[in-house]
Image: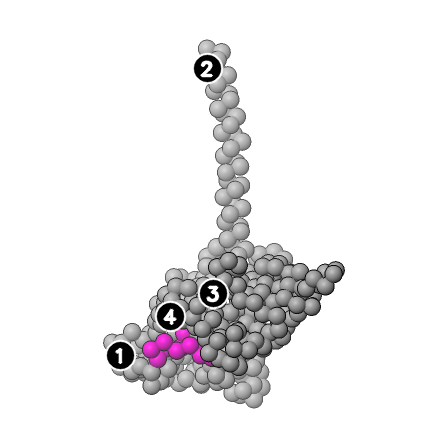
Amino acid sequence: MKRTILLFFVLFSILLFTVPAYTADTNDIESSIQQESLQRVEAVVYGAPGAGGMFLRLGRVERDLFGMELPGSLTERQQALLTFVEEGTPTQPSLVFKISVAEWVTMNRVNPSQPLADRMAILEMALEGEPQMGALSARLERVLTRLLPNGVFSAPATIPSGTVIKAAFARTVTVRNVARGDIVELNATEDLIINGVLAVAQGDRVFGEVTRVRTPRSFGRPSEISIEFVEVETVSGRRTPVTLGPESRRAMEIDSGTIGAAGASIAGLVLLGPLGLAGGFLVRGSDRQIPEGSLMYVETTEAFTTTGYPIAGGQTMPAPAPVVQTDDFIYSDPSAGQSTSDFVPIDDFSTQTPPPSEHFY
């Protein structure tokens, strides 16, 4: 009997301390996910994650985007923001996609590394002569309405595996300004158009990771920088893996104006193959550097379907929906003259008042 009672108290003690620990772990995971989603939104709006409490940061993003804070719980508001800014819906492409379309139509390139406010100011200067005031989402919708009065369209684009993308380093990289694990950015130098649909625009980012850094050492031993390519960003903001593979190496050899076997523009360049760092390269020399603007070729490692922008003349465009204006909204009416093609018209809101959370999902 005593042994049974002792066993009961042992089990009770285990449960007493295990359940709170499990709950704490679950809360930590949920908090980490919330932090990550908010940081992703802040990276688009401000160019980098913010600091401070989540409620303060979330409220700031909502006010800057919509002119007011959204209703709902912390989780609901964050999911609504993430969907609106980055993910989009079948009938509402994301803010990232729409700002890229506006930039590409206006300037034939995109600027995803810049904060949303700066991107809007550049667009407004080009189109209206001066930056405007107000909520960022409303400013974008006003620009799109004037720039593309027949509406903005999206279409699926499948990028085949082995597709080669030409890109240039966004800044000079040396052994003095990077460390192992740092992410370096390149920008696509040409548009990638798949069956008449813009999938990757000039200016979209290619990401590489620094895998080794060695400063010049004694006895004349050279410095080293090695970089492995990771991902390319598409017009929609979605990313797909890339590498430095056989197709991209072949492109380097053919293009005598860039790097590789046909005359390297990066001194000390060594392309690393199966025996080295697959998908990367090494720069070795006396304090060598990779100058800003240095060209590289990368290739996709798998087929990837993303949301792209259909270019006039590439495929048959759907009949544009008439623009309907009310006191509160300007939107395109998809019920009038809509085509049966795969193109999806964007009929987003254009006022500073944000739609309720349930409109996003």
Q: Is residue 197 magenta?
A: yes
Could you tell me how far apart the alpha carbons at marks 1 and 2 are, in whole angstroms?
75 Å
Closer to the chain start, of discs 2 and 4, is 2
C-beta proximity under 8 Å, tags 1 and 2: no
- Residue 325's disc is none
Residue matched to label 4: 159
Residue found at the very far top of the displayed protein: 1
Packing grade of label 2 (10 A; few <14, some 14-19, many >=20) is few
- Above or below, 358 against 263 in this view is above
Q: Is tag 4's residue or tag 1's residue first in the polypeptide sequence? A: 4
Q: Which residue is mark 2?
A: 4
Depth order, front residue of 220/258: 220
User: Is the Cβ of the residue at disc 1 closer than 8 Å to that at disc 3?
Assistant: no
Percent across and percent down for residue 247 are 43, 70
Q: Gap in Å between the C-alphas at discs 3 and 4?
A: 14 Å
Is disc 3 surrounded by few (<14), some (14 to 19) or many (20+) residues within 10 Å? many
Q: Which mark is residue 243?
A: 3
Q: Nearer the viewer, residue 191 or 337?
A: 191
Quarter of the image where one finds residue 332: bottom left
Give the residue type at disc 3. Answer: Thr
